[in-house]
Amino acid sequence: MPFHPTREQIELPMVLDCLSDPIRLAIVYQLAQQERVSSELCCGDFSGLGGKSNLAYHFAKLRECGLMQTRVAGTNRFMRLRREDLDARFPGVLDAVIKSAAKDADRLQLLSECEMVDADRK
Amino acid sequence: MPFHPTREQIELPMVLDCLSDPIRLAIVYQLAQQERVSSELCCGDFSGLGGKSNLAYHFAKLRECGLMQTRVAGTNRFMRLRREDLDARFPGVLDAVIKSAAKDADRLQLLSECEMVDADRK
DNA sequence: CCAATAGTTCAATAAACGTTGAACATAAGG
DNA sequence: CCTTATGTTCAACGTTTATTGAACTATTGG
């Protein structure tokens, strides 16, 4: 059971620093897209963004700064955004960042490989 | 005449990275407060936040990422937030971050020394 | 012209960061 | 039980970062 900060422990500079890395921004973006559906993704769903050990490093940062939560289930770890906590703590920040990221999706290479293929198809 | 990126050259990760440093966040916060009044501040107005050479380093970062603009006038350099460009490029981001910073002002040590003194007085 | 003021630039240092591959842990399926 | 799949941890590395003080530039005011 990995470390998660409480809502009150979440700090703005850490959150912004986490979001400032392109890979982590892409992870958060992908989690935000998933919010409309199941709201959870597991590590493997992000394989388009880098190698496993590098992703594990970024997952840990995202967890420790309070941006996401990890639930262990079998050999999988399911993740979701801590939207309620973030909206309570820093109202509007997450939304504005994700919307801006969406606007720059191509520039930021925000889509995972499989999504890119889907986008090409249509 | 120092380098300033064009509006289109401003990138989200760089902006977030700039805002993730406590000193730079304090500079931006102070510039945002000043927007209501003269909208410009010069380097010396931030002396509460650190030494001159360290501030010059942070000023350069803020300029190069597009967060602020520097106008040279005599021996002074006047700075202001590039609010129009930022709002056009990343709507809501700057506002949400500044509001969140204001909420955490004490935790973030956002006030310069003289402002702290003023706050103590009242 | 000289001194003081405002701010930048440079070199040096220590710490933090992102990336890699190999080793490890754990649970699921045959 | 053994293998496979999922994901983390560790050590190593090169890079970037923030911070310092000293040297420097340029402008203002006497």
Image (spheres, coloured by chain):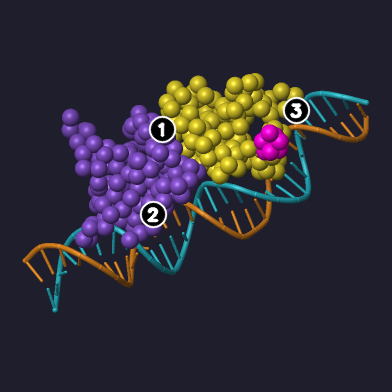
Chain colours: A yellow, B purple, C cyan, D orange
Using the numbered discs, state the Cα–Cα distance from disc 1 to disc 2 in whole angstroms: 22 Å
Image quarter of residue A30: top right
Q: Secondary structure at mark 3?
A: loop
Point 66% across, 41% down: residue: A49
Point 53% across, 30% down: residue: A66
Residue A116 is situated, as x and y percent measured from the top left of the image, at 67, 38
Query: Which residue position holds label 2?
Result: B4
- Chain under numbered label 2: B
Location of the C terminus of chain B (image quadrant): top left
Please state if B73 lies on the left or on the right of A111 as rendered.
left
Query: Which residue position holds label 1?
Result: B92
Query: Which residue position holds label 3?
Result: A75
Any part of residue B58 in sight: no
Point 54% across, 35% down: residue: A102
- Chain under numbered label 3: A
Q: Which residues are magenta?
A: A115-122
Residue B19 is situated, as x and y percent measured from the top left of the image, at 42, 42
Q: Main secondary structure of the magenta part?
A: helix
Point 25% across, 47% down: residue: B41
Q: Secondary structure at mark 2?
A: loop
